[in-house]
Image (cartoon, rainbow, N blue to C red):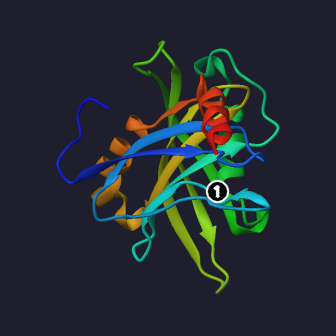
Amino acid sequence: MKDVPGGFSPLLELYGKAKNRKPLLVEFLFPSDWVVVLPNVDVNGEEGTIQAGQYSAGDTATFFVVKDAEKVEDITTQPKDFFQNAIVKAISQKGDNIYQNFKIIKAEPSTGEYKNQKYMLVDFKYELLTGAGFEVERRGVASVTSQGDGVQLLWAASTRARFKKTETALRTITSSFRCYSEGVGLQLAQVENEF
């Protein structure tokens, strides 16, 4: 990471420390006053994800691996419904009945610094259905890539009412997202063999 703007901190974390997941190295910037949550690893494997947020305000950034997705050589050539399906899977991890009216607003390609990795930055909106029966309008930005043999994304969102205030931060977070698979599994195996 070359430039870290004031008020942001870099996060570099290994996702997939246990054998039930394929290892990925994940990095992104997050606002320094946000709380970071990392996956739990125990004898049963790894669960959870890499996330940062100001949870009391409803602002979050969450890493997500699309299950059963195959490697995509150039993510920027995929149709709109590809990104819609990936982001909907990410926001609906707790069930399909927690959102409605999902819509992609725009998508634009981006290139990473390492080996010209391809990313697609996607603006989206949806309504979150809370357990208390409220509908909360949410706006977000996601960065979608395909590293290793799957598809990964980092999505960041806040309430529609806060989006004007948080938009710059959400774009900084998702624009800084990088995901690496090359050599990570080899390094992890070497570390495990040392113990």
Q: Where is residue 108 shown, x and y percent of the image?
A: 47, 26
Q: Is residue 106 above or below residue 59?
A: above
The image position of residue 177, as x and y in percent, is 45, 37
SS type, badge 1: helix
Q: Classify the position of the N terminus by image quarter.
A: top left
Residue in view at x 65 percent, y 47 percent = 17
Tag 1 residue: 91
Q: Please state the horizontal and vertical placement of residue 53, each as a whole percent of the image.
A: 43, 63
Residue 95 vertical position relative to residue 179 in the rendered view, above or below: below
Residue found farthest to the right: 68
Between 106 and 114, the one nearer to me in the picture: 114
Looking at the picture, how far across and down is residue 52, in whole percent?
45, 59
In the displayed structure image, the side of residue 101 where residue 105 appears, left or right = left
Which residue type does callout 1 highlight?
Ile
Left or right for 153, reference 46? left
Would you call the spot at circle 1 few (<14 residues within 10 Å), some (14-19), or many (20 or more)?
Answer: some
* Residue ranking furthest to the left: 6
Q: Is residue 155 visible?
A: yes
Residue nearest the viewer, comparing 152 with 42: 42
> How many numbered tags mark residues here?
1
What residue do we see at 78% from left, 27% from top? Answer: 70
Q: Which residue is at the front of the view, 150 or 90?
A: 150
Q: Residue at x 47, y 56 (%)?
A: 157
Q: Is residue 146 visible?
A: no
- As drawn, the residue found furthest toward the bottom would be 132
* Corner quadrant of residue 47: bottom right
- Give the answer, above or below, for where 17 lies relative to 98: above
